[in-house]
Image: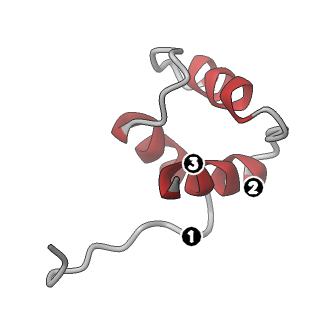
Amino acid sequence: MQRAQAARSALARLAYDVSDLDRAVRRFQIETDLVSDGTIGPRTLLAMYALSEHDRPKLNRGAP
C-alpha cells in the first residue's frame, strides 16, 4: 500500500489525474517509455521520483 500512496502523490504532482491510479500509472509508463503494465515497480517509481520535485525517497543505512 505504501508504494501506491507514493505513486499517487508523485503522479498528482506531475499533473496526472489519479482518480483512477491504474490508468494514471499506465499513461505515465507510456509517456516515459516504460512497459505499460500498470505495475508500480522499481523502474516506474524511479522514473516518478526522477521527474518529481518533492518527496524523493531517502536511503537509511540502518534500515533492515
The answer to the question of whether label 1 and label 2 lie on touching residues, with beta carbons closer than 8 A, is yes
Q: Residue 61, position in %: x, y?
A: 15, 81
Direction front: furthest residue: 1
In the image, 55: left or right of 23?
left
User: Which amino acid does the dot numbered 2 rest on?
Assistant: Arg
What residue lies at 63% left-to-right and 30% top-to-bottom?
Answer: 25
In the image, 62: left or right of 12?
left
Q: Earlier in the sequence, mark 1 or mark 3?
A: 3
Quarter occupied by residue 28: top right
Residue 7 to residue 61: above or below:
above
Q: Residues within 10 Å of mark 1 (few under 14, many from 20)?
A: few
Q: Residues within 10 Å of mark 2 (few under 14, many from 20)?
A: some
User: Which amino acid does the dot numbered 3 rest on?
Assistant: Ala
Q: Circle 1 — which element?
A: loop
Mark 2, residue position: 13
Q: CA distance from mark 1 to mark 2?
A: 10 Å
* Numbered circle sitting on residue 55: 1
What residue lies at 62% left-to-right and 63% top-to-bottom?
Answer: 53
What residue lies at 68% left-to-right and 49% top-to-bottom?
Answer: 8
- Frontmost residue, 57 versus 5: 5
Mark 3, residue position: 4
Q: Residue 4, position in %: x, y?
A: 57, 48
Tag nearer the camera, 1 or 3: 3
* Numbered circle sitting on residue 1: none
Q: CA distance from mark 1 to mark 3?
A: 14 Å
Quarter occupied by residue 9: bottom right
Q: Earlier in the sequence, mark 2 or mark 3?
A: 3
Direction bottom: furthest residue: 62
Q: Earlier in the sequence, mark 1 or mark 2?
A: 2
